[in-house]
Amino acid sequence: MKMGLSNVLVLSQVTTYILTLLLALCIIIPIFFHLHDFRGHCLLFSNGTWRETDGQFAVSWASQGFCDYNLTWASISLLIAIVQIYRFIVQICRGTESTFLSAFFDVVVSLIMSTAALAGALIITIGYQIWCNAIMMRFEACEDATSNDIDKDDDIDTRMFYTQFGTAQFGAWTSWVCWVGLSMFSMLKLCKYHQQENIRVSMARERARLVRDRHSPLQD
């Protein structure tokens, strides 16, 4: 079935996948540099106490898996976006359209990635809040720790963590919105294909009935 460049649904999908690609980078790059600055430690869900003797923050580090999870789903999101952008651009240039099976696959992938993005966004938001709550036992605001050496024992660099996780949090929540949007686009396309298939089946049945009606008198 031919498809013109004016197809709003396909162009909306391409645009959203481009946004998803950029937002995945907003998660991957900051968290990657955060792990480098924190010597492999992940601040998400990490807690600690302030020592009275030297004013240092004795951190009880949480699992690095919280950061790794967000790196993983964001990387998968990036790869899917690249593949889908290429696929839809090729379809637009060739004037073709997706099949029912590929549209169904898009729905499944979009729903899975929506769930993964929501989980990642919640992990970043809640985990970062726990870290900030511990930091604010000494400072008025979480970002105040960026200009202080709070943990010399672990030799971490805290100068950029506030910007890094602010960016990652924005990227995660906005990615979730994009994946929800892509799920809706995919479902709309699937419904359209289902309606088209029903119309084709109805027309085929009607043609068959007309042929039977036309030949019935001759047989009599």
Image: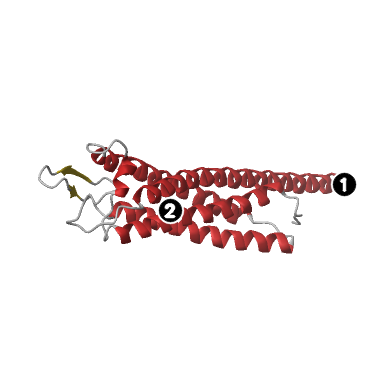
- Which residue appears at 59% of the width and 44% of the height? 187
Q: Position of residue 166 (x, y in %)?
A: 41, 46
Question: Closer to the camera: disc 1 or disc 2?
Answer: 2
Q: Position of residue 13 (x, y in %)?
A: 62, 50
Residue picked out by circle 1: 214
Residue nearer the viewer, 136 or 189: 136
Q: Which mark is residue 7?
A: none
Instruction: Name the residue type under label 2.
Output: Ile
Instruction: Name the residue type under label 1.
Output: Arg
Most extreme residue toward the right is 218
Query: In screen coordinates, is 18 left or right of 133?
Result: right
- Which residue appears at 53% of the width and 55% of the height? 22
Residue picked out by circle 2: 27
Q: Residues under labels 1 and 2: Cα distance? A: 66 Å
Please identify the quarter of the rendering in which residue 213 is found: top right
Please identify the quadrant where the N terminus is shown. bottom right
Please identify the quadrant where the C terminus is shown. top right
Most extreme residue toward the left is 53
Q: Is residue 133 visible?
A: yes
Q: Answer above or below: position of 94 versus 187.
A: below
Q: Tell me the SS state at disc 1.
A: helix
**Label 2 crowd (10 A; few <14 / some 14-19 / many >=20):** many
